[in-house]
Amino acid sequence: MSTSSSSSLLPDLAGTFASLANSQKKMREGSTSSTDDAATDRSVTPNVTEDAKRLANDAEEFIQNSDNKQLIQFGLMAIGAVVVLKTIVQSIVIILFLLGPMAYVYLVQTCPTESSFDGKKELKRILRGHHLPEDHPEKPKGYFGKMAAKVTASVQTNVMTAMPGCEQEMTSYKGAFRIVSMKVPSANMQCYWIGALSSWRYVHSRELSTAQRKND
């Protein structure tokens, strides 16, 4: 009976020893692969470090070069100018967005009426040189010169406005300001005024085109 029990224990012990041996073998294989991976990581790490050092050295040499320094400074100045310009533009847009409606309301309220424009009076000012600068050779000088220019301008205005073809046209722009054009064929000129901010201002005069003279 003891012999049978001993013989039955032998296979169990053999199986236990075999499983232990397999376990140890697997552990050795796992440790070997871990060691290989660690060695691979250690071999890669120096390569990455060397590349980083090489890049740092190249960047330092690039910056220390005098020509490259000027190029870098110019690039930084250009970037700064773009940033400042962008800030200014954004500020102007915000200001216009806030003040635009207020400015429009103010222009509408101060826009002169159509009846306030006196064509003869404004034309007379042009003929007597009222809008000419003081150093202009055709600007009347002295008291008598100015008086003579006023009298001459009054006579010329009455004659010109009575001639056929003298026309006056007024255009309103959204009620904010008005533009007046007066065609004077007898003087071969067309005059322009702008009405805004409670007053009329002379803009300029030009000669009539050939087509306009023929139409008149």
Image (cartoon, rainbow, N blue to C red):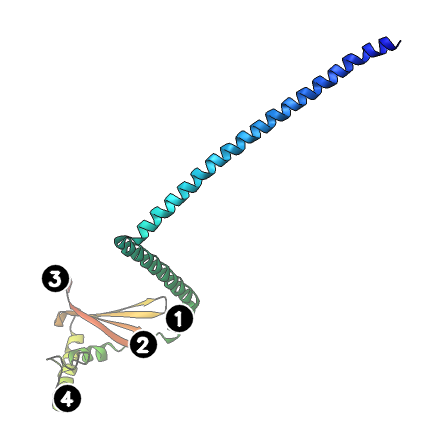
The kind of residue tagged 3 is Thr
Query: Left or right: where does residue 75 sit relative to residue 12?
Result: left
**Rounded to the nearest whole Å, what is the CA distance between mark 1 and mark 4?**
41 Å
SS of the residue under disc 1 = helix
Which label is found at residue 210?
A: 3
**Residue type marked 4:** Met
Residue 55: x percent and y percent? 37, 45
Q: Residues within 10 Å of mark 1 (few under 14, many from 20)?
A: few
Local crowd size for mark 2, using a 10 Å CA cut-off: few (<14), some (14–19), many (≥20): few
* Residue labelled with disc 2: 115
Between marks 3 and 1, how big is the CA–CA gap? 41 Å
- The secondary element bearing badge 2 is classed as helix
Residue 184 in view, yes or no? no
Report the residue marked by disc 1. Answer: 103
Which residue in the structure is indicated by mark 4?
A: 147
Q: Look at the picture and state if 88 lies above or below 149.
A: above
The amino acid beneath tag 1 is Ala
